[in-house]
Structures are given as structure tokens and as C-alpha cells.
Amino acid sequence: MPLAERQLIASIRCAAKLRSSALVTGIGDDCAVLRVPRGHETLVTTDFSLEGIHFRREWHPAESVGHRCLTRGLSDIAAMGGQPLAAFLSLALPNDLDQSWADEFLKGLLALARRHKLPLAGGDIAQSPAGVLADITVLGSVPKGRAVLRSTARPGDLIYVTGALGASAAVVEALYAGLQLDRSKLDAHFYPQPQIAIGRYLRERKLATAMIDISDGLSTDLSHICEESRVGGVINETAIPIAKLTSPKVQLRHALHGGDDYQLLFTARPKTKVPRRIAGVAITPIGEITRSRNLTVKSADGTKRQLTSQGWQHFQQNPND
Ligand SMILES: [Mg+2]
């Protein structure tokens, strides 16, 4: 192992030290040993953060890349109503990368981990032939049989979203356009917070019938719930909470189709009393699940149009290149 790699592991081990009742043995043995609470099931999720696809080194500070890498995993645990137990990071770095980049990446990742009392319990480091490749695995737990699934929405259920949507997509568009941005006011894109507390709240009180996190965009993620539940849905365009930024301006299309918001999209029976705010975050009803398996958007004047899922296109193609 090159010395740099050994040093990196040592600094991860040092920085990742965090006492957790779930962690029996962490970094330093062949496997981590985890203790899952009695009567719980284990949740596992894994997500890539690839340079040129999920981030660009010239646009994203390393600290933001580390933060967003872990947010992707934590947001999936939130979407099941789970409690995160431990994270595992596999990181491949090109050999021309500054050590300070790796340090800042870890700083961002570990700061978010600490906020959720989540130990970094293992992983792997390798040399990448090109670009930074990070793969985060997050383990979580949920009481047996209580995970909130995508497949259990029913006709008549109301559709809700947490927070506001579209900021991240609007920022990405502005980055492509080469606009000067004040990054310190754009945490929604650079430092999005996974909605762990809301997911847990909804699961503990049995408020949600189905749930997903909005990582690919409202239109795509709602279609996932509808496909898995074999239902359709109608969204009221005027009800969608569009994020407010001074610059860039967030538009409806960003809120409808933009990804990387990491808010939660869930359904609840029409009689269920869903609070207007949970953990300080607004909860907004935006539509209804239908028996007919179409996805439609209703405009302010009552006209309906088909809602087509427009996948999130990340940073692959730069229209200005
Ligand atoms: Mg997800």
C-alpha cells in the first residue's frame, strides 16, 4: 500500500471515531461488526458519486462532494422511515489529486455523519484511472415489518412533499450557463440535508402509506411510487412548493423534473391528519393517487396534461461544451 493511502486510512480511522451502540467493531478488522436493535430489520442502500456525472471538481468544493455523497445514502434510509446505523465508503482517487481534496471531501462527509451520530465503519481506497469515484453504503434499521415502501399507495391517498423543490436543478442549470453564483446561499444544492427525522416521524405514527425520496425529480420519483403501487396520480400544479432563491430563479419545470432535492414524497390516507410542519420543515399536499394509472398535472385553470417523467441528467453533457 502506498504511504499516501496508508495515511488516508489512518486519518479516516481517526476522524471516523464515534461511539455508537450499533457499532461493535469498526475500521481496523476484516469486517465491521454491527448490532441491529432487537426486533428490527436491516436497511441497506448504496449510491455512486462519480466525477463528471454527479459532480464536477471545478464547480463543487470537495467538502460539498463529501456531504452530498453521504446525503444520497441517508436520504434513502429516510425514505424507508429508518434510522441510519453505519456508513461504508469506497473511494477511488486519481494519483494527481491533491491530498487536501481528499481531506476536504472527508471533512464534509464526516461532518454530516456526526450530525446523524453515524459511524463510518469501513470501506476501501484505491487508485482511480480517471476521476474521483466514491461509493457510499449506508446501513439502517427499522422495526420489523414497518419499513415504508413504494408499493403501498392506494387510490384516494393524498400526495405530499416535504420542503421546497427545484433549487438544486436551477443551480445546476446556472452552473452550465456559467453564471456567477453566491455558493454560500445555495446550501439546497451544495449541502442538502437528508430528511431522516421526517421519515422516522411519519413511520412511527403510521402516517404514510408509501414513501420515496426525491433524488431523480418529482415526476420520475412519483412515477416510481405509482408503478410499484399499480396506481396513477394527479398533481395540482399550483400546489407544488417551488424553492425560492434570489439567484438563480427556480421555475416550475425545475420543481417538477429536477433531481437532487433529497426531499421526501409520500402518500397518506385522506382522513389521516398530516401536520403542516414536521421537524421545522413544511409538509405540502400536492395531489391525489388515482385508480387510473395515468400521471397528470392539473393547471390553475383546471386543464389537465400528461406528466411525463423527465429523467435527471446530472453533469454528463454540458450544453455549452
Ligand atoms: Mg431513493
Image: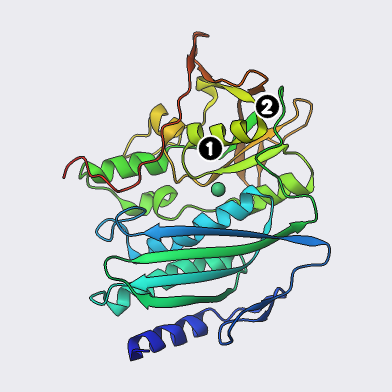
Image height check: is 181 above or below 35?
A: above
In percent of width and height, residue 22 lies at 70, 73
Disc 1 Cβ-to-ligand 1 distance below 8 Å: yes
Circles 2 and 1, Cβ within 8 Å, touching? The answer is no
For image coordinates 56% across by 33% down, the residue present is 222
What number is the disc on residue 292?
Answer: none
For image coordinates 54% across by 24% down, the residue present is 239
Disc 2/disc 1 C-alpha distance (Å):
15 Å
Local crowd at mark 1 within 10 Å, few (<14), some, or many (≥20)? many
Identify the amino acid type marked 1.
Asp
Q: Which comes before the other along the chain, label 2 or label 1?
A: 2
Image height check: is 143 above or below 1?
A: above
In percent of width and height, residue 196 lies at 63, 54
Which quarter of the rendered picture does the C terminus lie within? top left
Q: Quick check: 2 left or right of 177?
A: right
The residue identified by callout 1 is 221
Kindly indicate the quadrant of the structure image that contains residue 284: top right
Kindly indicate the quadrant of the structure image that contains residue 41: bottom right
The residue identified by callout 2 is 158
Secondary structure state at the residue bearing disc 1: helix
